[in-house]
Each structure stands twice: as C-alpha cells, then as structure tokens.
Amino acid sequence: MEYVYAALILNETGEEINEDNVTAVLEAAGVDVEQSRVKALVAALEDVDIEEAIDTAAAAPAAGGAAGGAAGSDDDDEGDEAADEADEEEAADEEEDEDEEASGEGLGELFG
C-alpha cells in the first residue's frame, strides 16, 4: 500500500511518477524498497489519469445492506434476538467485504 501512497503523494505535489521519485518518497518514509514493485507500479500507472480515478472512486455510491428483523411471537423472543444478532453480523461481514473489494479494485493487479 505504501507504493500507492507514494504515487498519490507525487501526484498531489505535481511531481512526475517515475521510478526515481517513487523510490525517493518510499526511502524518505523508511520503507525497504523493492525495485520490482516500483517498476510494476510505474508501469501500471503509465496511462492512468489519477485525478479521474480518484473522482470516480469518490463518486461511487456506498453499497450496504440492511438486515431486516423477523416478526414473531413473544414466546420466541430469545430465538428472535439470536436470529437478529446473526443477521446483523452477516450484514456487517458482507459490508466489510464489499468495502475491502471497492477500496482495492484494480490495485490488486499491481502486486499479484
């Protein structure tokens, strides 16, 4: 992730995203630089408009599902609570998975 952040820093400061600049930013941050990863990043970002990619990512609606409660009788309150809890946990897990997928979409290809 540090490599992507280095590219974002260079983009934000208006510097060219090349191997030397990415390496310099990473070394300044105290990262042990792997030149193969730097080369892969620079090659992957060669034809990418980073500003457009950021705008597109920011404009994407947040996906999330709401867990609905089941209507039941008063005799089965404990079962309903357990079911509601399980539904909430499942919804939270699904939302977390979707967030992880959305945040790294396309970037996973850089690092295999």
Image (cartoon, rainbow, N blue to C red):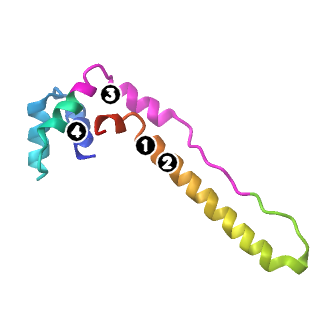
Which amino acid type is shown beneath numbered disc 3?
Ile
Q: In the picture, which quadrant includes the C terminus? A: top left
- Give me the disc on residue 103: 1
Q: Magenta part of the protein: which range?
A: 43-67
Q: Nearer the viewer, mark 1 or mark 3?
A: 1
For the residues marked 4 and 3, what is the alpha-carbon distance in whole angstroms?
A: 11 Å
Mark 3 crowdedness (10 Å alpha carbons): few <14, some 14-19, many ≥20: some
Residue carrying label 2: 99
Q: Residue at x 51, y 51 (%)?
A: 97
- Give me the disc on residue 50: 3
Q: Nearer the viewer, mark 4 or mark 2?
A: 2
Q: Nearer the viewer, mark 3 or mark 2?
A: 2
Nearer-N-terminus badge (1/3): 3
Residue 10, picture quadrant: top left
Nearer-N-terminus badge (4/2): 4
Q: Residue at x 65, y 63 (%)?
A: 88
Q: Are marks 1 and 3 in contact (CB under 8 Å)?
A: no
Residue carrying label 4: 9
> Callout 3: helix, strand or loop?
helix
Mark 4 crowdedness (10 Å alpha carbons): few <14, some 14-19, many ≥20: some
The image shows residue 27 at horizontal and vertical percentages of 9, 46
Which amino acid type is shown beneath numbered disc 2?
Asp
Which amino acid type is shown beneath numbered disc 4?
Ile
Q: Are marks 1 and 4 in contact (CB under 8 Å)?
A: no
User: In the rendered view, would you say 69 is above or below 42?
Assistant: below
> Callout 2: helix, strand or loop?
helix
Mark 1 crowdedness (10 Å alpha carbons): few <14, some 14-19, many ≥20: few
Which amino acid type is shown beneath numbered disc 1?
Ser
Q: Are marks 2 and 1 in contact (CB under 8 Å)?
A: yes
> Callout 1: helix, strand or loop?
helix
